[in-house]
Amino acid sequence: MKRILFFSVLLVLPFLSMKAAVDPNFYVYLCFGQSNMEGNATPEAIDKQYVDPCFQTMACVNFSDPARTMGQWYTAYPPIVRQGTGLGMADYFGRTMVKNLPENVKVGVVDVAIGGTKIEGFIQEEVAGYIASMDPSSEGWLINYFKAYDNDPYKRLVDMAKIAQQSGVIKGILLHQGESNNTQSDWPQKVKTIYNRLISDLGLNANDVPLFVGEMLSQAAGGACWAHNNVIATVPDVIPNSYVISSDGCPGKDDHLHFTAQGYRIMGQRYAQKALHLMGIEAEIDDPTASATYQIDKRFTSLAEIGSTPFAIVNETLGKAFYGSAEQHLGFDIYASAFVDTNTGNLWKLESCSDVANGYFLRLITPQGTEYQVWGGYAPGYLNSQPLDGYCSFILGNSETNPNAKHNGQDIVNGAVWQMEYVSGKGFSMKNVGTGKYLKTNDTAKYDDPTYFQFCTLKVATGMHSVVRNIVTDNRYYTLDGRQVEHPTKGIYIYNGKKVVIK
């Protein structure tokens, strides 16, 4: 009897040791997409320098150079995705994560990406037909990419993720894809299908696993697929725990599709910045265009609370704000681009409309704090939702003597009067009185479902470098914004220049 019991214990021990091997401080992120996630830039000297071993990558195919075996972890020197790929989104995501997390935390990426694929390449019931539709004479390269994943990249991602779960905890999913589905309105729903399946197939809780979706190369950078960013902006409307990563200010290649090495560095840092923000860590990144320069100071919860105070209108999820551009059009961009003195304005003021019950104009305020006047002082400048020469203009030619006058086709009711509704935990929605449609971005208010904005004041964020320099050897605990704590409780602190976690 004792022998049987002893033998039973021996059988159980391997399973116990496997379970015990899961490290809660090993944060795993799944990555998928097409060529910009795959990595299209040649790594430069700076990218080949020391990589912290706390940043790991799982080989999702077999490599010969560098030598890597599928299903095993390695220090994440590029290339991460496959032999022959380049620097991509995941490289500086992981480097930035470990730089800002406590020293006992590791970060691993599981990256399956195929340059040129449509989103259908990750939908199991569609992938076979998609591959069959390819022309071997012109798309043989793409067919071969799929062969590397046994013609089922979604299955490979799940198989590798399950191996990763034996040693770590999946904390999020990174996506960069869309060039091959440019401007297709059903793209967000297809992304949702893949996201929901990953959550189900890996036994995850969607509330604990955010999805981070990167924008295409911007119009300003010459991106050929920049218009797809308007589609990407709607992903948080269909996937609640999802966040858009801005590509504004990131340089691109001459092919108008791919980022440069510097562009990938910036994008990777921005992915990490958002992931860390959700953990309560405000990361400092090497990105002069980053929106982290500004923080929300005061959030308003009612129009009465706002009163006559000038306020910013921001989408906190996107990290973007509305502003008046130098061309007298409505802009919607990252904070660092919105809140500059070269814009005609970036704050707004409530102004009641006597002709519409519960309706308000949103009057543009200049950087000098005055009310903006259009056409050389002829008329007030209001946020408008009607297109003017293809743009959503904030200009309303509202005559002081005739408030219902029309100028340049702009109508006072359909063009400038808003009803704002506050929902706790979400913010304000903005509905056009005349059309009953909601504003979502610097496009005509044309949406049936509300998008929520914060009406707020802003402050310049405290940089981490200044905090760290002041306290590197004083053996005291500080919060992430530099406040000394005598008796720290649970949370993340800075101690002698390092982030530490007190549990």
Image: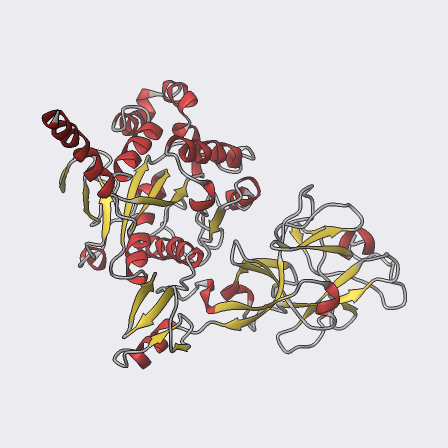
Q: Is residue 124 shown above or below 493?
A: above
Q: Position of residue 371 (x, y in %)?
A: 72, 73
Q: Position of residue 396 (x, y in %)?
A: 76, 60
Most foreground residue, 434 or 237 = 237
Q: Residue at position x 35%, y 69% from top?
A: 493
Residue 408 visible in image = yes
Q: Is residue 68 shown above or below 253?
A: above
Instruction: State the quadrant of the C terminus.
Output: bottom left
Q: Residue at position x 31%, y 41% from top?
A: 38
Q: Position of residue 436 (x, y in %)?
A: 76, 45
Most foreground residue, 423 or 23 = 23
Going by the picture, which residue comes out furthest to the left?
3
Tell me if 497 is positioned left or right of 436 in this view: left
Residue 211 visible in image = no
Q: Position of residue 140 (x, y in %)?
A: 29, 25
Q: Residue at position x 41%, y 64% from top?
A: 282
Chosen colour scheme: secondary structure
Most foreground residue, 236 or 80 = 236
Instruction: State the quadrant of the N terminus.
Output: top left
